[in-house]
């Protein structure tokens, strides 16, 4: 057909069939203007009743709820429909065909905002890492002090009793520090050191204050919550690497704790008598108790990091109805699980 003949056919007045469209909604324009059929594209399956055929052009890699049932269409194939050339995706849950709009590329302003948001997120992660290390360090020292408080109180009482019996009231905290240090050294020499002091009175001093021990439970719960937060914040990190991240934080805290313990043990500067007694107790009780406290807190942190995502998914299922779970699908996708809303008892239709 020539170009002139085609123009004449299109410009003809509408026929009766065009003025009375049929039930298909397309009228009879196909009868008055015979459009050439589109050639079949490679890889296009033949259309079936109730199905949408087309060339697969991409895969949805982000959250996109179905407009019919709110099922998350992530992972579904994007098809180019054969008749109009539109991009569509078919919901495997309810069968509804959703149109995919083609958006232009974002401008420089949006890209700069995205870069600024990424930088802010990195700063927040670094700050949270510093906070986690601070919690590990400070709380392990607190647990050590609480655990050894009965021993510290007994040592102070015995030293003050020895001072009362040997100094005739001449020993006070206002004395020069060298004199206080000499008095502490004399007491330690008489009792044979802290270890001998413990062995002679272990029935009364070996027990740990039960109320102090109970504080390890809420403090461990705090580090467990921090581990859950790390698990959700690092969704792109696998579980093994997540363990490495938490172990790195524990290692940093351990180095800080070890440095403070060494500083306490090797310091030779004159100090008040109560600080000298604390230094004498440290290698026997304080440092081991701090190591135990750090181990408890580190175990809680690592356990929270491993169980964080399952706990978060459980909270989403508990508090959100199915139609509102789609924006939280990243909690499932991060671990390679099916997004919420998928009916496992129904196989996804082919195509």
Image (spheres, helix red, strand yellow):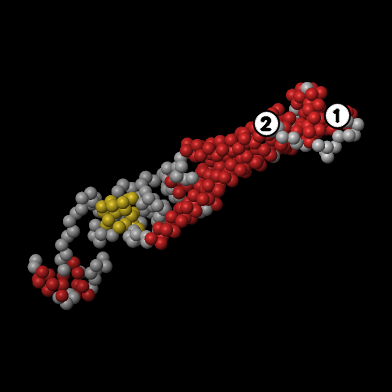
Q: Earlier in the sequence, mark 2 or mark 1?
A: 1
| Residue 207 rendering spot, x and y as whole percentages | 75, 29
Residue 113: x %, y % from top left: 44, 59
Residue farthest toward the bottom in the current orientation of the protein: 13
Q: Which quadrant is the N terminus positioned in? A: bottom left
Query: Which of these two is toward me, 271 or 63?
Result: 271
- Picture layout, residue 174 above or below residue 182: below
Q: Which residue is mark 2?
A: 266
Instruction: State the image coordinates of residue 116 (x, y, percent, origin top left).
Output: 46, 56
On the question of residue 109 being in view, the answer is yes
- Residue at 23 percent across and 49 percent down: it is 43
Q: Under tag 2, what secondary structure?
A: helix
Between the C-alphas of marks 2 and 1, the distance is 26 Å
Estimate how packed mark 2 is, as few (under 14), some (14 to 19) or many (20 or more) residues with alpha carbons within 10 Å. few
Category of crowding for the residue at label 1, using alpha-carbon neighbours closer than 10 angstroms: few (below 14), some (14–19), many (at least 20): some
Please say whether residue 48 is visible from this viewpoint. no
Q: Nearer the viewer, residue 173 or 307?
A: 173
Identify which residue is drawn at 66% across, 34% down. Answer: 263
The foreground one among 262 and 207 is 262
Q: Which residue is mark 1?
A: 162
Residue at screen point 32% across, 53% down:
78
Q: Secondary structure at mark 1?
A: helix
């Amino acid at each position: 057909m020539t170009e002139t003949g085609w123009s004449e056919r299109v410009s003809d007045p509408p026929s009766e069939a065009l003025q009375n469209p049929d039930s298909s909604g397309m009228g009879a324009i196909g009868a008055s203007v015979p459009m050439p059929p589109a050639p079949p594209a490679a890889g296009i399956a033949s259309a079936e009743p109730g199905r949408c055929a087309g060339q697969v052009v991409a895969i949805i890699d982000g959250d996109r709820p179905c407009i019919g049932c709110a099922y998350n269409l992530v992972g579904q194939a994007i098809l180019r429909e054969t008749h109009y050339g539109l991009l569509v995706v078919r919901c495997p849950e309810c069968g509804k065909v959703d149109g995919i709009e083609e958006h232009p590329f974002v401008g420089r302003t949006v890209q700069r905002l995205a870069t600024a948001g990424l930088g802010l997120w990195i700063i927040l992660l670094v700050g949270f890492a510093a906070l986690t290390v601070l919690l590990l360090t400070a709380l392990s020292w607190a647990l050590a002090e609480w655990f050894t408080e009965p021993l510290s109180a007994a040592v102070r009482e015995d030293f003050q009793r020895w001072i009362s019996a040997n100094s005739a009231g001449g020993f006070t905290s206002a004395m020069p520090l060298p004199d206080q240090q000499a008095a502490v050294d004399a007491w330690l020499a008489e009792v044979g050191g802290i270890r001998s002091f413990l062995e002679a009175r272990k029935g009364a001093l070996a027990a740990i204050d039960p109320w102090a021990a109970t504080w390890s439970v809420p403090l461990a719960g705090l580090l467990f919550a921090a581990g859950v937060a790390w698990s959700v914040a690092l969704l792109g990190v696998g579980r093994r690497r997540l363990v490495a991240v938490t172990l790195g934080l524990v290692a940093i805290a351990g180095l800080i704790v070890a440095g403070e313990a060494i500083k306490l043990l090797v310091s030779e500067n004159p100090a008040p008598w109560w600080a000298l007694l604390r230094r004498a107790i440290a290698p026997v009780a304080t440092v081991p108790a701090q190591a135990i406290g750090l181990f408890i807190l580190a175990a809680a942190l690592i356990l929270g990091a491993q169980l964080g995502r399952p706990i978060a998914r459980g909270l989403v299922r508990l508090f959100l109805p199915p139609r509102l779970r789609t924006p939280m699908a990243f909690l499932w996708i991060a671990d390679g699980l099916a997004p919420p809303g998928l009916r496992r008892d129904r196989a996804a239709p082919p195509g």
